[in-house]
Image (spheres, rainbow, N blue to C red):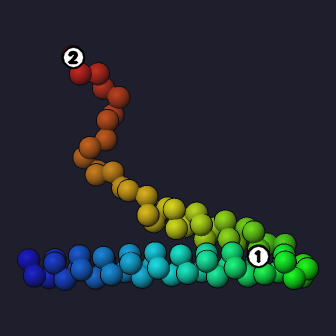
Amino acid sequence: MNNRRRIESVQDWLYVVIIGSLALYLVIGVIAWTWMILSGIPAPDAFATILAAIAGALAGITAPLQAPGSRDHGSPQA
């Protein structure tokens, strides 16, 4: 059982590191994009796409997951 708790602890820290990294990249990207717009520097064409991908990854990893056994298969309860 101790091994399982250790693995869960590592997974929790891994999620924290991933979420922190994605949030940091998103903040840095938005600041850089805003700075480029205000300075009159033309932003690269794919800059918005990269920021959208980072935001999507952040939303995807923070979305709550549904337990595998709790899905409703559409069968009516009679």
Residue 58 appears in the picture as rendered: yes
- Which residue in the structure is indicated by mark 1? 34
State left or right for residue 29 relative to residue 14: right
* Numbered badge on residue 74: none
Q: Callout 2, which amino acid?
A: Ala
Residue sitting at 61 percent across and 77 percent down? Answer: 27
- Name the element at disc 2: loop
Residue sitting at 51 percent across and 81 percent down? Answer: 21
Label 1: few (<14), some (14–19) or many (≥20) C-alpha neighbours in 10 Å: few
- Position of the C terminus by quadrant: top left
Q: Callout 1, which amino acid?
A: Thr
Q: Nearer the viewer, residue 78 or 34?
A: 34
Residue 43 appears in the picture as rendered: no
Q: Position of residue 2 (x, y in %)?
A: 10, 82
- Which residue in the structure is indicated by mark 2? 78
- Position of the N terminus by quadrant: bottom left
Q: CA distance from mark 2 to mark 1?
A: 57 Å
Q: Position of residue 11 (x, y in %)?
A: 31, 77
State left or right for residue 44 relative to residue 55: right
